[in-house]
Image (cartoon, rainbow, N blue to C red):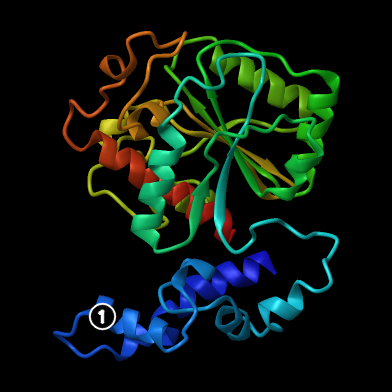
Amino acid sequence: MRMALWTAALACVCASSPLAAVEEGEDWRTTLAEAEAAGATEASDTGIVGLSADELAALAGEESAEAADEEVPEDFIRNRRRFVMREMKFNADWDTDPTAVPAFVYQFQRRTGMDAQALQPRKPLTFDDPELLDWPMVYMTAHHAFTLSDAETAGLRKFLDRGGFVFSDDCLYGMPYGPAFHGEIKKALPEGDFKPLNDKVDGVSMLLKQKYAWTHVSETGLPMKLGNNPFEYVLVHGHLGVLYTPPDLGCMWEISSPPTPSNPLGAGMHNMDMEAGKREDAYRIGVNVILYVMTH
């Protein structure tokens, strides 16, 4: 059901929205307000302006959202009608970029029109938490090395085997986090191989241009401002299960950065937009990643 809803959302928003009938020159906000006053469902039900959950389900050829929720299927995923970015907690400085995820999710909402949420106050997951299997993707970042317990390793393996996606962002490439992450993934998934991602890799390379593309890219297929260290990926049962991003996207996503033990200077250290357009490229590549994962 989750894939059907996302597919319908991406394909049918223009044809189905009451805003499609807005005449040129009219104010769509006024039209939407009038539609809501007449009893239309608010956009927050689906994240698509003017399209209710029931209308979206009908477009996908399914029963109404209300009826569908009467009997909970075994593979039910909470908040399946919105994108929720869950953070992972582990025994390193997992919370080094406290405002990165909320800032990025806000940009994702603005750029896609989809309903999205970052949990505030933060409610991180651990890999041995049974709730992990309720979510299709998780995000993690740190500077320092870490290890997973046997229970966490088993939980990570189950998550990947069942189609989950781990988005791992290296907070300052060259620190111990990157090698530790590679080692822990290899421990959970011995048959998994990290491969460099570029714009020539069949299938997976679409991640680099799913919504946004760049005229000038490095040999890794990334926009020039994000450097030459390639993204790395691991396929699990033929699908993208793990993505490792060396450029430190989280620090670029942050608009403000309060002091933390690993970042005592706060925003002064994380002023990643001194090079014009760098933060914008980080937002765009993040949107590409999420849209690719949710549609493949």
Please state the horizontal and vertical placement of residue 37, each as a whole percent of the image: 39, 84
Extreme-left residue of the structure? 25
Towards the viewer: 64 or 74: 64
Quarter of the figure with residue 182: top right
Up-down relation of residue 165 to residue 169 (above or below): below
* Residue at image coords 80%, 18%: 149
Name which quarter of the figure residue 122 lies in.
top right
Q: Residue furthest front?
A: 37
Point out residue 3 in the picture as x, y percentages from the top left corner.
64, 66
Q: Amino acid at mark 1?
A: Thr
* Residue assigned mark 1: 30
Q: Quadrant of the C terminus?
A: bottom right
x, y percent for residue 281: 29, 41
Number of marks in picture: 1
Q: Say if residue 11 shows up in the picture.
A: yes
Could you tell me residue 248's position as x and y percent?
41, 26
Identified at 75% across, 80% down, the residue is: 67
Q: Quadrant of residue 226?
A: top left
Residue 205 in view in this figure: no
* Residue drawn where x is 68% and y is 18% of the image: 183
Q: Is residue 36 left or right of residue 151?
A: left
SS assignment at label 1: helix
Mark 1 surroundings: few (<14), some (14-19) or many (≥20) residues within 10 A: few
Q: Is residue 79 above or below residue 142?
A: below
Vertical relation: 263 (above or below) 129 = above
- Direction from residue 128 to residue 25 in the image, left or right: left
Residue 175 vs residue 82, the one in the foreground: 82
Pick the residue in front: 100 or 34.
34
What residue is drawn where x is 82% and y is 66%?
A: 72
Q: Quadrant of the N terminus?
A: bottom right
